[in-house]
Image: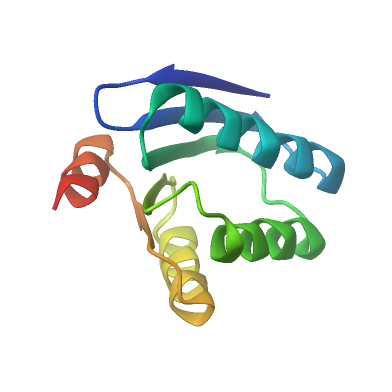
Amino acid sequence: MYEFEVRPDHLMVRQRGLLTVDVALQFQRVVEEEMSKAGVRLAIFDNRETERPEEMVRAVMWTWLGATTCLDRLAIILVKERNTRRANEAADRNRVRVSAFFDEQEAIDWLRS
């Protein structure tokens, strides 16, 4: 469902399939562990191969993003413009340093800016 790649200044997380609440909670713990081990505070979640989760799963993830101390910035890579716009609006509402992109290089550039 997800795999990690440690890069020099960020953690790349490639996700696939449908996230459930239980998987989301486990995912959050593993992301925090991986970021701590890697010594990075920036991450990219590549969600191009995921399915739209239920509202409760989205709420669990946004709540975690607002509360976790392991992330300074998160870029999300999505496929559809509508999903990117929706993710950016949710990030604004939740006051988190998250931005959604179509392109991996744009996401990396934003993390480093």
Determine the residue located farthest toward the right in the rendered image: 22
Query: Which residue is rendered at x = 62% and y = 29% of the image?
Result: 16
Relative to 18, 49 lies left or right: left
Which one is nearer the viewer's eye here, 107 or 96? 96
The image quarter in which residue 6 lies: top left
Picture colour scheme: rainbow
Query: Which residue is rendered at x = 32% and y = 46% of the image?
Result: 102
Determine the residue located farthest toward the bottom in the rendered image: 93
Residue 84 point in image, percent of width and height: 42, 60
Residue 79 sits above or below residue 91 on the image: above
Residue 80 in view here: yes
Which one is nearer the viewer's eye here, 86 or 99? 99
Relative to 42, 1 lies left or right: right
Query: Which residue is rendered at x = 45% and y = 68% of the image?
Result: 96
Residue 100 sits above or below residue 78 on the image: below
Residue 53 sits above or below residue 28 on the image: below
